[in-house]
Amino acid sequence: MEIQTSGKPIDSLLEKVLCMNILSSDYFKELYRLKTYHEVIDEIYNQVDHVEPWMTGNCRGPSTAFCLLYKFFTMKLTVKQMHGLLKHQDSPYIRAIGFLYLRYAGESKTLWNWFEPYVKDEEEFSPGSNGRMTTMGVYVRDLLLGQYYFDTLFPRIPVPVMRQIVTNLERLKLPSKHSGVTGETSRHGSDDTARRPPSVKAALSVSFGQRAPHRASTRDSSPVRRTLPLPPSYDRNGSDRERSREISDRDYSERDRERTRGRDRERHGDRDRDRDRERERDRDRERDRDKESERRHDYDRRSRGSRRDYESSYHRRSRSRSRSRSRSRSRSQSMHAGSDRFGNRSSPSREGSKEKVSAASSNLAKLKDMYGDLGEQKGEAGTERAPIRDSGGEEVIRLGAATWK
């Protein structure tokens, strides 16, 4: 049965820089030949002399112990194999790598059950490369209580689980504080060894073809040189150097602040320029819109004026036509009126003649009654001799010898 783990991917258990250095190292590539659990244990027994994550000296690659630990990550150990690691009698480094496996990959709730039988273990060994000796029990307690392991980061234990671990240690009357055998509780606080640079990102492997990260002071961090007392003059120079470094750091920070301020000003200036450009563009657009509206308005006015001119000319033409028609009509009406007047003038004469004829005929009837047949004969002869003539509107009737006009 496999060990209950946190379920995280293998490459996320360790810090990214350390993981990348392990995968790219030549030693880890040689470990592909190891196929079984026992072969890896034999390799630990023969090659491991400390359990720090980084090698010491000029070569700043990953340590042998962590390359073999990553090999165990890929093999996914079982519960029986883990018990074999933790109880191994040949080498304390085999046991230490087992505890590291549980601290990195194990479920945080099960850590106390694994570590409790060994919190008082008295086997002595040196976890670091500086030769400082400690017991396995102190090492195990520091793995539980510490968040950092030789300047590398452990997976975080939840606060309730950590409280339970502290309570269990206090119940066993054991120290519940970090002792410092695995480095300080903060990343930059370790003074015991010169294992690695202060930043994880600065830890670059030689196999990457990059310059190895330098320590703050290799000579001063050496265990041998730390035991030797420094002369007072050297100490004074060191203090002067520290002061100069502090001053240079202050100047550098001030320079950085000035640079950031200048960048901020440039950014604000660029933003202001962009805003001004946008405003100018908006103004140009407004002007173009106004010009376009004015053009349209002028066009509309011109079109309306042309329409009005056309309509006025059309009305003028229609008026002239109506006037000519009225004139022709008036002329025709005047001509008809003249003809009517002429006809009216001729008709009275005719009517007068008719009245005269009727009067003459009435007179003639009276004469006939008065004179009898003789008068009729004479009248007939007279009428035969002298017929009725129209001379300019007068009629003459002759009866017998006498005439009436």
Image (cartoon, helix red, strand yellow):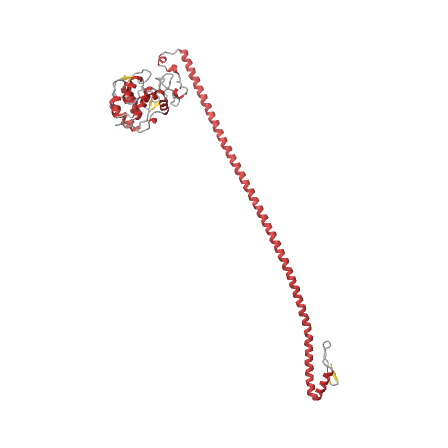
At 50% from the left and 31% from the top, the residue drawn is 270
Image vertical order of residue 370 relative to residue 265, above or below:
below
The answer to whether residue 244 is left or right of residue 321 is left
The answer to whether residue 122 is left or right of residue 360 is left
Residue 346: in sight, yes or no? yes
Residue sticking out furthest to the front = 33
Quarter of image, res 391:
bottom right
Image vertical order of residue 55 relative to residue 405, above or below:
above
Please state the horizontal and vertical placement of residue 211, each as a whole percent of the image. Answer: 41, 19
Image vertical order of residue 293 relative to residue 207, above or below:
below
In-front residue for pair 225/3: 3
Residue 66: in sight, yes or no? no
Please state the horizontal and vertical placement of residue 345, each as a whole percent of the image. Answer: 69, 72
Please state the horizontal and vertical placement of residue 223, each as a whole percent of the image. Answer: 35, 14
The answer to whether residue 199 is left or right of residue 333 is left
In-front residue for pair 385/389: 385
Please state the horizontal and vertical placement of residue 188, each as a whole percent of the image. Answer: 37, 21
At 57% from the left and 46% from the top, the residue drawn is 297
Quarter of image, res 31:
top left
In this rendering, the count of numbered labels is 0
Quarter of image, res 141:
top left
In-front residue for pair 250/285: 285
Image vertical order of residue 376 relative to residue 321, above or below:
below
Q: Quadrant of the N terminus?
A: top left
At 61% from the left and 52% from the top, the residue drawn is 310
Q: Quadrant of the C terminus?
A: bottom right
